[in-house]
Amino acid sequence: QEDLLVLRKTVKSFLAVCQQCLSNVNTPVKEQAFMLLCDLLMIFSHQLMTGGREGLQPLVFNPDSGLQSELLSFVMDHVFIDQDDENQSMEGDEEDEANKIEALHKRRNLLAAFSKLIIYDIVDMHAAADIFKHYMK
């Protein structure tokens, strides 16, 4: 039980550091922090206690509304962007096409990570409504 509390404290500290990194000016740092947050929230979700593992309850983390809104804001700012704005100076050669495909793949991965949080009821379902708005346009 004591080990669980030590692990909880460590994970909580790491989650806080990752949350602070979402405000970093360096985009790759923000993206990595976002992915880490999504992965950790999946690992340490209420699903952890299924199958008779109620003893792991101290390790369960539920994101507060502030973290949920930061994650949603990140998705809105980094996933739902106009690709033409992102690549204004690119001319269309093969390397530029490869860069566009890579950027699209990265955005899909970010959206998938957040979508998992919605599907597994870790993030409030209202977040899904904001995401669906972009598909209705």
Image (cartoon, grey):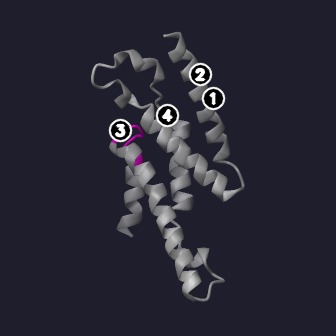
Q: How far apart are marks 4 and 2 (CA)?
A: 15 Å
Q: Nearer the viewer, mark 3 or mark 2?
A: 2
Per the image, the residue denoted by label 3 is 121
Residue 15: give x, y in percent of width and height: 59, 34
Q: Which residue is drawn at 62% across and 40% down?
A: 18
Q: Which amino acid does label 3 sit on?
A: Asp
Mark 1: secondary structure: helix
- Name the N-terminal-most of marks 1 and 3: 1
Residue 59: give x, y in percent of width and height: 47, 23
Residue 103: give x, y in percent of width and height: 54, 69
Residue 119, picture quadrant: top left
Q: Which of marks 1 and 3 is in front?
A: 1
- Name the N-terminal-most of marks 4 and 2: 2
Per the image, the residue denoted by label 1 is 13
Instruction: Tell me: residue 22, above or below residue 57.
Output: below
Mark 4: secondary structure: loop
Per the image, the residue denoted by label 4 is 63
Q: Which amino acid does label 1 sit on?
A: Ser
Q: Distance between the residues labelled 3 and 2?
A: 23 Å
Per the image, the residue denoted by label 2 is 9
